[in-house]
Amino acid sequence: MSPQYVGRFAPSPTGPLHFGSLLAAVGSYLEARVRQGRWLLRIEDVDRPRTVAGAEHAILATLERFGFEWDGPVWRQSARDAVYGEALERLRRDGRVFDCGCTRREIADSAVGRDGAPRYPGTCRNGLPPGRAARTVRLRTEPGAVLCFEDRVLGRICEDVFSDVGDFILRRADGLFAYQLAVVVDDAASGVTDVVRGADLVDSTCRQLWLQRCLGLPAPSYAHLPVGTNAAGTKLSKQTFAPPLDDDRPGPALHAALAFLGQAPPAELAGWPPATIWAWAAANWRLSAVPKTRAVVVPDEFQENPA
Ligand code: GLU
């Protein structure tokens, strides 16, 4: 029994849930249930321009129809700007952040980091060049600081955040707080002990570990589940027209999610009501059965909406 376990599901309200987001919901939910922990729901609407009207409502409705039960009130990042601002001020007092005047285009020509994005070349880390105004706020990284964690699915993962990413943005040019800051502050503030999420976020984890260290926050444990891709290897997302989950047919989608996550559900499970599915799943869930890979192709019907 581990009553201290706190997990979470943190969807961005950029559209309705699709099969890819269901995988993170199912994995984080079942792991919290078998560890007899709490499972929090956090709407990650810090990125206002990407927020789609009605998406949060649709996400909550789908989770309810699929029989998910979250603990406590829903967290919303859009209500927490003051808390993110305080964290940024603390970092500033400690000399951990600096104002940056570079545009995205100026950085685009830099050497590319491990995740394919350009590495910040350090232009403004010792002060803004004359005549330049601050656009973003960046967190300093340190040469030689290799960050590692034991991923509970993928095993040991390390990254040299300084050479692979460089000083990264905590406050964007449009004034909004960056995902990395919001997620680290919120996971700590809500007492999250275990993050279970899609492997598309593996490459953010070492940045988050570094930020936790700079803020003096504890690091949760991490488990990254394979993400669903189409046959061409592209991650399922709203951009690839992954169809929304059908609220009237939770069984087939939950069956497919459990199968995808290596849990070998019986075929008849697809026809059961959610409560029965969750009883089977909670009795049979094993994180160790999840494929130890970052991506797996999903069944056709969950891949692409015929236009
Ligand atoms: N909001 C992110 C997403 O929808 C998840 C962030 C996280 O789990 O850390 O992909």
Image (cartoon, rainbow, N blue to C red):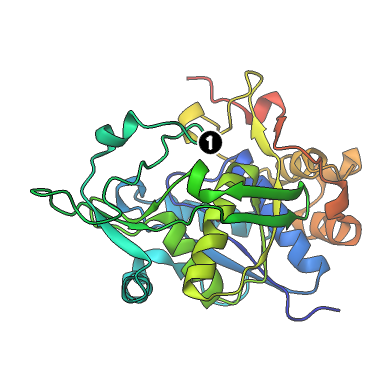
Mark yes or no: residue 162 visible.
yes
Above or below, 106 relative to 154: above
Quarter where residue 105 is shown? top left
Q: Indicate left or right for 287 with 223 as reference.
A: right
What residue is drawn where x is 53% and y is 59%?
Answer: 208
Mark yes or no: residue 246 visible.
no
Above or below, 110 relative to 99: above
- Say which of 50 and 207 sits in front: 207
- Say which of 66 and 41 sits in front: 41
What residue is drawn where x is 74% and y is 74%?
Answer: 37
- Mark 1, ligand 1, within 8 Å: the answer is no
- Say which of 31 and 200 sits in front: 200
Above or below, 107 relative to 204: above
Q: Indicate left or right for 6 with 144 as reference.
A: right
Which residue was labeled with disc 1? 115
The picture places residue 180, in percent across and down from the top left corner, at 46, 57
